[in-house]
Image (cartoon, grey):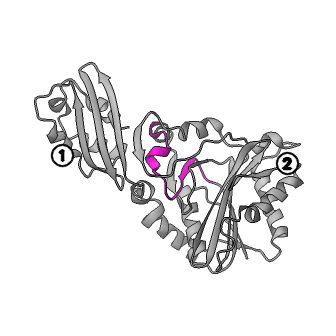
């Protein structure tokens, strides 16, 4: 077993590293890692539906899709993640969350923190969630990973994961809201997140006596960075993989009411219609046709609208007002 020493805080790199060690390295693996601010969405989720787009973009919070199912979670440097990859050709370990969370729970007991496994995949302290867990299988191997909220910024967590009043309907799996708690307030004595990680790493070396420290070498690093370029750092994976959805937003402006309805497939607008009591010198279907095939992202739409005489289609409407209607 390899105890991988991963010091990256790049969320795209770290999610790619998990896939690399699952699919390309035959050894069992345990890895601790932290991310800079990011929303990590489940494999089957609609990314747009899970985030407050304005909050995330204003604060430059990354959005990245992971290999496993489940709900969206917020990561920052106050959150610690653990990954365990093991042989499981018979599929007996899949959904055995007690087995894979046991070392974390035992470690926390050494710090005087008693926890419980709740439902299928959550760890609780005093009835509040501090750890969400998820799993995936590939070629007879199992990946289990989980979060540990140690000292995360709860303001960012609430802001990034609270989507605004978007009128989205999709068949994607939606996140279940849970009351969450940082572990730091349950410690008998103060501890930094760095010390917490170091002590958890030492505990893992005892719990997994067959584990040996392993540094990510140049060959590993090159393959991981290739995965970032080809997959985890791409809009196509992080947003385009979202299930199809419909979007509706209605706003009252000084120039009239605008009712926007869209169908979005693989993250791109397939059909857009505008309804309302607005006026325009040009037929609105010209704007609707221009939107077809455009990514449902703020950057892509703002780029498109810079070349469109918005006021000709919606008299009195500015580009900023129309852009805001899409989110």
Vertical side of 22 occupied by 127: above or below = above
Q: Does 149 sit above or below residue 159?
A: below
Is 137 displayed left or right of 214 in the figure?
A: left
* Residue at image location 62% in from the left, 47% down from the top: 76
Q: Does the magenta stretch include residue 49?
A: yes
Residue nearest the observer in this picture, 159 or 171? 171
Q: Quadrant of the N terminus?
A: bottom right
Q: Residues within 10 Å of mark 1 (few under 14, many from 20)?
A: few
Q: What element carries label 2?
A: loop
Q: Residue 141: which numbered mark, if any? A: none
- Residue at point 31%, 31% (across, down): 320
Query: What residue is rendered at 80% in x and 71% in y?
Result: 208
Question: Which residue is under mark 2?
Answer: 113
Residue range in magenta is 35-54
Q: Is residue 240 above or below residue 76?
A: below
**Position in image of residue 171 (x %, y %):** 44, 51
In the displayed orientation, state which residue is furthest to the top.
254
The percent position of residue 184, horizontal first and vertical second, equals: 78, 43
Residue 289, disc: 1
Distance, label 1 to label 2, CA atoms, is 58 Å
Question: Residue 255 lies in what quarter of the image?
Answer: top left
């Amino acid at each position: 077993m390899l105890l991988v020493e991963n010091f990256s805080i790049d969320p795209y790199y770290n999610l790619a590293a998990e896939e690399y060690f699952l699919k390309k390295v035959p050894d069992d693996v345990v890895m601790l890692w932290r991310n800079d601010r990011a929303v990590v969405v489940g494999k089957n989720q609609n990314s747009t539906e899970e985030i407050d787009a304005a909050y995330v973009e204003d604060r430059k919070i990354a959005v990245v899709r992971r290999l496993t199912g489940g709900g969206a979670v917020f990561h920052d440097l106050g959150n610690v993640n653990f990954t365990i990859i093991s042989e499981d050709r018979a599929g007996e370990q899949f959904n055995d969350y007690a087995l894979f969370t046991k070392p974390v729970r035992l470690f926390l007991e050494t710090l005087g923190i008693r926890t419980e496994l709740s439902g299928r995949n959550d760890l609780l302290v005093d009835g509040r969630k501090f750890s969400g867990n998820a799993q995936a299988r590939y070629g007879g191997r199992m990946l289990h990973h989980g979060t540990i909220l140690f000292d995360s910024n709860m303001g960012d967590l609430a802001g990034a994961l609270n989507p605004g009043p978007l009128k989205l309907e999709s068949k994607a799996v939606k996140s279940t809201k849970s009351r969450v708690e940082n572990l730091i307030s349950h410690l008998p004595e103060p501890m930094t997140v760095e010390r917490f990680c170091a002590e958890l790493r030492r505990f893992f070396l005892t719990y997994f006596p067959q584990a040996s420290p392993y540094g990510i070498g140049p060959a590993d690093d090159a393959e991981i960075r290739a995965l970032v370029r080809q997959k985890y750092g791409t809009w196509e994976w992080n947003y385009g993989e979202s299930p199809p959805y419909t979007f509706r937003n209605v706003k009252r402006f000084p120039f009239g009411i605008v009712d926007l309805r869209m169908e979005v497939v693989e993250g791109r607008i397939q059909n857009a219609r505008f309804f309302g009591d607005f006026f325009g010198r040009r037929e609105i279907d010209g704007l609707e046709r221009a939107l077809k095939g455009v990514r449902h992202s703020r950057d892509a739409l703002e780029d498109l609208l810079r070349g469109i005489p918005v006021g000709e289609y919606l008299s009195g409407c500015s580009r900023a007002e129309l852009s805001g209607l899409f989110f």
